[in-house]
Image (spheres, rainbow, N blue to C red):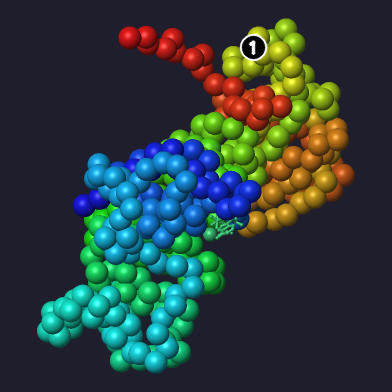
Amino acid sequence: MSRVELTGIAKSFDDLQALDDVSVDVEDGSFFVLLGPSGAGKTTTLRVIAGLEAPDVGDVRFDGHSAGGATPAERDVAMVFQSYALYPKQTVAQNIASPLRARNVGPDEMQKRVEEVATLLRIDHLLQRHPGQLSGGEQQRVALGRALVREPRAFLMDEPLTNLDVKLRVEMRAELTRLHRHVGRTFIYVSNDQAEAMAMADRIAVLHEGRIQQVGTPEEVYDHPVNRFVATFVGSSRMNLLDCEVQDEVLIGTDGWRLPAPPAALGHPGRLQLGVRPEDLSVAGEGSGGHALRGVVYAVEPLGDRVLLDVEIGDTVIRVKAAPTVVHEVGQALDVCVDLTRAHLFDHDTGLALSRHAEPARQTL
Ligand SMILES: Nc1ncnc2c1ncn2[C@@H]1O[C@H](COP(=O)(O)OP(=O)(O)OP(=O)(O)O)[C@@H](O)[C@H]1O
Ligand SMILES: [Mg+2]
């Protein structure tokens, strides 16, 4: 059982601040994903949790107790790294058993535990092979088995699927969520792949430049991103951003378009950006209705079930996920409909999202 809490963690390497006031509360038994681009501070956060790195400021708590200066072994967490680091001269069974040998577990108990874990991971037929005789995915499972055999209080996984090919990655995602349900322990999983995070997480913390941007369920970070970074990082195709400002209840685009201003924009002075995901745009005449932007097709990319259209709206190129039924050609003029109920507005300069609904009055005590 383990709830993991980080409070106000800061960590610098020389003059580089890798983590700045990082606070997260990982519920016991949840699948928590730390999501962010390269250099965001994800591995550093995991290493701080594991006790491999001491924070400059802040506290790590397991079930309410400060880990203080506890060693990695005392924290009883298992880390799975991107590189599997298996022992090449040992069999799969010996590799999986290695954490138990260090703990003086008897041979019968050891064999039983190794077989249980191998069955769970569906590698029980490989126990007598050596790592060099396994595929990447099989090696990955052995590394997972070595972590699982110990029954630690929490699993820390640092991009464990990055070395696998796309198909295997998608398969392993499902395996990992199944495994998580089976063992019922806390998983803290690092990823730079938003699709992976969306597919696996109970909750996601988006990390950028050492700071937590947002923590929420996959739906919350997708539907209600708090700023432009989260909005454009999460989502299978990047959110479109259109410069604009509001005048007399009308949103006026820098590229000349006009749309009725959503309530959040009213009374907001200065430059704004309208954010719309490609899936919330459609081509007029496809039965979508709504408010339209006039544009010219710039590029067409058929995806099978959808067609990705790049459309020039003035000086801005936006991406539209259109139905594949109508043929579109480069240079063709069309109207792009915007689902304003799904659109986002950002302050151009700060990048902060304008709330879609008026803020409820804050309660004072
Ligand atoms: N031991 C170290 N010494 C100096 N700088 C470090 C050290 N470890 C990490 N950093 C720096 O801290 C920042 C965060 O690194 P970290 O490894 O946590 O990023 P990450 O989010 O895991 O990135 P990636 O996705 O590339 O693995 C980076 O700028 C990195 O160069
Ligand atoms: Mg890393």
* Side of 106 relative to 356 (left or right): left
Q: Nearer the viewer, residue 126 or 70?
A: 70
Q: Residues within 10 Å of mark 1 (few under 14, many from 20)?
A: some
Residue 69 against residue 278 in the figure, above or below: below
Picture quadrant where residue 120 is located: bottom left
Is any atom of residue 23 visible in this view? no
* Side of 121 relative to 43 (left or right): left
Is any atom of residue 96 visible in this view? yes
Dot 1: what SS? loop
Image location (x, y in percent) of residue 147:
32, 69
Picture quadrant where residue 340 is located: top right
Image location (x, y in percent) of residue 171:
43, 67
Mark 1 Cβ inside 8 Å of ligand 1: no
Q: Nearer the viewer, residue 220 or 214?
A: 214
Residue at point 65% right, 45% down?
238
Residue at point 25% right, 78% down?
102
In what quadrant does ligand 1 lie? bottom right
Residue at point 25% right, 44% down?
65
Q: Nearer the viewer, residue 14 or 170?
A: 14
Residue 89 against residue 86 in the figure, above or below: below
Image location (x, y in percent) of residue 199:
44, 52
* Side of 344 relative to 3 (left or right): right
Q: Nearer the viewer, residue 77 or 55?
A: 55
Image location (x, y in percent) of residue 28:
26, 47
- Residue at mark 1: 266
The quarter of the picture where the C terminus appears is top left
Residue 347 against residue 5 in the figure, above or below: above
Q: Amino acid at mark 1?
A: Leu
Residue at point 67% right, 13% down?
268
